[in-house]
Structure formats: structure tokens, C-alpha cells
Image (cartoon, rainbow, N blue to C red):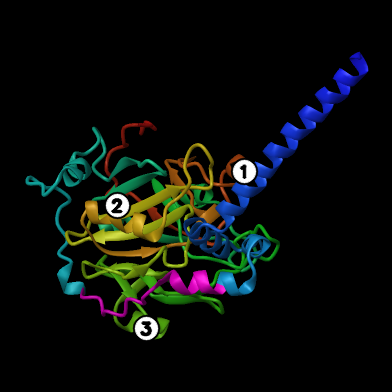
Amino acid sequence: MKKKRKIRLKISLFTVFVFFLDLSVIAGLLVIHNYRFKSFWIPTAMTTMSHKYLAYTLYDEDVVNKVMSENYIEKNTEKINLDDIVISDGTKKHYSNKYERELFTKDKGNDIYKTIRINEPKFKGWLIGIYDPSNVELAVSNKLGKAGQSVNKLVLNNDALVGINGGGFEDLDGWGNGSIPYGAIIQDSKLIWTHSGGSGGLIGFTKDHKMYLTYETPKEAIANGMEAAVEFGPFLIVNGKTSKIHGDGGWGTAPRSVIAQRKDGVVLFLIIEGRLPGYSVGATLNDVIDILVRYKAYNAANLDGGASSTMSIEGKLWNRPSAGAEYGGRTVSNAWIVTNKQNKPALAPVKKEYK
């Protein structure tokens, strides 16, 4: 009798297990075939350097191609108008919105930059406002072509205060050491590097510290005043006009790095943390544009994202990268940094405050 009860119990437990297994399979199939999931999963996988296979693990080539064709960004070919940028003294008495007030309410003892926490329902990040654009420079690895360096290292090597990663690079080993940058690099009005694989256009600054976004050749850009630039993209805002992005633009949801400039010359560094379940999923390009518009960005461009998205403040890794935090952040080929050219008094220590 007891033996029969045990058998019945085992059968019942097995039946329950099979029932929940079936439910899990059905739920999984429903998720996989859900359009919103496809539109999230496929572009996000396809924008990574070494995990594109994840898109094809769940879907065949036709489905991947169809989703990618529905998620794209229209190339912003408008010629930038540098005359629109009128560099101010970095102060403001009247604000158009609460975000502008936040930006120009300077941290005590710091007239060079302002640190702002970005805290959205699906993602978190950091925005840095640099009041004087002449403090923004491009730093490159001292082993360019052989090995990269972390943003932290590039900041320390150049006696800088702040830094974010710049352009992309070849991922030779599945992780990438930042040794072979994509596209062109201009520094001190000279073309110091060029390599195939560059995407987007030239992102940089002129000799008079105005952000210059162009599809010109490096030679043409230098002739027109470009002093420092990397080649990447896409351009997100040009002359105050946002790019037209369909779906997520084919760039998925991921960690982001962006550089921008307001009409008054103030430069914005934006880092979005992502691929950190339970903390920050990441952002789409449209999400990034929404944040930039809040702070009145007039020109803006996307930089290398994913695991490369790193920010350093005063020699410390400031954001939570999706990988490599234990090493001080992924090694990259170049970074946009903030120096103290005016030799202003030592800044008050910056506190990392999470909201």
C-alpha cells in the first residue's frame, strides 16, 4: 500500500514538473516570437563585436535581416554651421528649464566641470558639463598601433581631470586591447592614424574649440580648422536638429558614450551604464538624444559603446562598465579628456553620489 502511494506521489510530482516545463517552453516561445523582444534582442546582439551569434542562436538569417531593416538611422548629412556656436564665459543667470539650472549650478570649488547623475527607470549614467571648451582635448595611447590604455591611464598620463572613451577599434581577440583604432585620428591638426573600418564621420573640435562633425576627408577637415578628431558615429544632433531614428536605429540597447556641445560652447560628456541586470539595462540612441535635448545640446555624436564605455574622474573609474571594472576599465585607443589649462586652484574633491 505504501509502495503504491510512493509511486502515485512520484507520478504526481513528475506530472507537475512536466506541466511547469511545458509552461516554461510555451512562455519562452511566446517571448522569442514577440515582436518587441525580437526588436530588442537582435539589434542589441548585432551591435556587439563578438556576440552577434546570439541573434542567430534564436532566429534565422531572414528574421535577423528583416528586424535590422526595420531598425535604422537616416544619415544626418546636414553641414554643420560653426557660426551658430558662440562661446560664453560658462555662466548663466536665466534658465530655460530645470536641467539647465542643474547644469549651471556649479559644484562648490569647481569652476571647470559639473558632475550630474542620470537616473532613469531602465538605465543609469553620468553627465559631465565642461564650461570652457578649450579644456577639452584628445588623448591617445602612447603605444598607438600596439596596445591601448584605460581611460583612467590616459587621464593620469595627461594630468587631466576627466575623461571618456573615444573612437572604436579592432577586436582582435574577442576582447580587444585598443591597439588598432578604426578610421582616422587627428591630433594637433595632424593626421596621426588612419585605418579601414571607420564608421560614421569625423567627430572633433576646431582650433577655436567648436565641435565639428563632418563627412569630409581628414585632409579637408584639417584645412577647414579641425584640430582633433576621431572617426565614429552616428551623428545624433546637428545644428540643433535630431537625427531620424527608426526603431532603435539598429544599435540596440547598450552602454553608451556620447560627446556633445551646447550653443554657448559648453561641452557635454555622457556615459550610460548598461548590460548590468537589476541595475542598468542600457539605452537606445533615442534615449540618449532625449537626455541631450534636456540639456540643450546643439551638436552631438555617438562614440564607441558597450564594454568600452568608461568615464574617469580625477584618476578614478567613475561609472560601472559592463566588463573589465576589476582592471580599471577596458583598454582603448583614445579618449576625450578635460584639462585645467587656466591652472585654476585645486578643485574640491568630487563625491560620487547615487540617487
Front residue of 82 and 302 = 302
From mark 1 to mark 3, how far is it between C-alphas?
37 Å
Q: Residues within 10 Å of mark 3 (few under 14, many from 20)?
A: few
Using the image, tell me which numbered label, if any, was put on residue 291.
Answer: 2
Residue at (55% x, 51% y) in the render: 150
Q: Is residue 150 visible?
A: yes
Q: Is residue 188 visible?
A: no
Residue at (62% x, 64% y) in the render: 179
Compare marks 1 and 3 and give the one earlier in the sequence.
3
Left or right of residue 147: residue 16: right
**Residue topped by disc 1:** 327
**Residue 242, horizontal then vertical, whole percent:** 27, 67
**Dot 1 lies on which element?**
helix
Using the image, tell me which numbered label, if any, was put on residue 216.
Answer: 3
From mark 1 to mark 2, how far is it between C-alphas?
29 Å
Q: Which residues are magenta?
A: 65-81
Q: Are marks 1 and 2 in contact (CB under 8 Å)?
A: no
**Which circle, 1 or 2, is nearer the viewer?**
2
**Which circle, 2 or 3, is nearer the viewer?**
2
Left or right of residue 14: residue 178: left
Question: Dividing the image into 4 quarters, which one contains the C terminus?
Answer: top left
87 relative to 160, above or below: below
Compare marks 2 and 3 and give the one earlier in the sequence.
3
**Residue 127, horizontal then vertical, whole percent:** 33, 47
Mark 1 is on which residue type? Tyr
Mark 2 is on which residue type? Ile
